[in-house]
Image (spheres, rainbow, N blue to C red):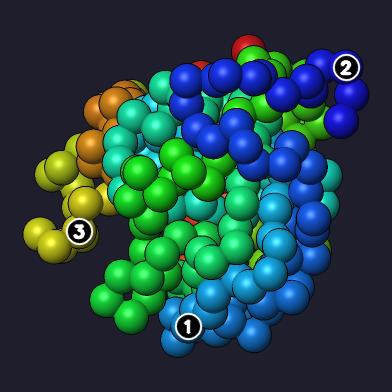
Amino acid sequence: MNDFDTPVTGNAFGNNSIEPERTISIANLKEKYDGFIDTSADTYTTMEGKTRIEGVIVGDDESGNIYKQLVVADETGAIIVGVNNTGLYAACPVGQKVVINCEGLQIGSYRKLAQIGTTYEGKVGRMPEYEWKQRVRIINKPQMFYEELKPLEISNATELAAIDMKRAPLLVTLKNVKFPEANGKVAFAPESDIASPTLSFVERNINFADGTACKAVAHTSIYANFSKDVLPEGNTNVTGILTRYNNNWQLLIRTSADIKQNN
């Protein structure tokens, strides 16, 4: 910790009795439990012994496109933390450093994407909010200078293909890309465009500047507050959380501010 990371004593949210330092990095945590993560069987296990991670919130639920989840990253990697409540960004917005006591929580896979939570119907689900409040310690105020908030820039299909899917989730910016469906009318995720009545999201294709198809689709909830925004035309930088669904990439745009059209 540095001078900017002084624990906030008496913080109204969270558990200030949690020791303010990690016992394991996020990358090492994921490696330790890889057998329960890198599988489409959605398996899980319980983390035993002193297990604390420390990281920065790089993805929150402000827009509704990330739902009842936070994305926490340190300098080694990132992981999904599921909490069964909305409005998580009020106490844990992007830029907030946290320490999470994981001992006794579950870690596992949702379609090969690493997640922390509690069990629900035989899988890793979202922990109750009261559990979350006992598990998290807030470190200082939100700051935007953390290295974890600098996205990995991806400019072509080769750079995307070079990323090990086990690194998901990770904060990225797709540089100078286009939405091939953009025509000034098509929106990100109108309810009329869902592929099935049982679904609540729309996926949009993305192309790199050279015309090559990007193998990461923009995965947007119809409940996101930018779902009805029109797809940008022309070259655009798109930032978001790169996740995986089995062996496919998905990009979760955090808010409309992640979409930057190039002049």
Let me know if residue 74 appears in the view.
Answer: no
Query: Hey, which quadrant is residue 103 in on the image?
Result: bottom right
Q: Amino acid at mark 2?
A: Asp
Left or right, residue 101 beside residue 181: right
* Gap between marks 1 and 3 measured at Cα: 23 Å
Query: Hey, which quadrant is residue 87 in on the image?
Result: top left
Query: Hey, which quadrant is residue 225 in on the image?
Result: top left
Left or right, residue 230 beside residue 116: left
Residue named by callout 3:
199
Q: Residue furthest left?
A: 197
Q: Position of residue 2 (x, y in %)?
A: 89, 24
Residue named by callout 2:
3
Question: Upstream in the sequence, badge 2 or badge 3?
Answer: 2
Disc 2: CA contacts within 10 A as few (<14), some (14-19) or many (>=20): few
Frontmost of labels 1 and 3 is 1
Question: Upstream in the sequence, badge 1 or badge 3?
Answer: 1
Left or right, residue 46 beside residue 6: left
Quadrant of image for the N terminus: top right
Label 3 residue SS: loop
Residue named by callout 1:
43
Question: Upstream in the sequence, badge 2 or badge 1?
Answer: 2
Frontmost of labels 2 and 1 is 2
Label 1 residue SS: loop
Q: Position of residue 31 (x, y in %)?
A: 75, 73
Q: Amino acid at mark 1?
A: Thr
Q: Amino acid at mark 3?
A: Leu
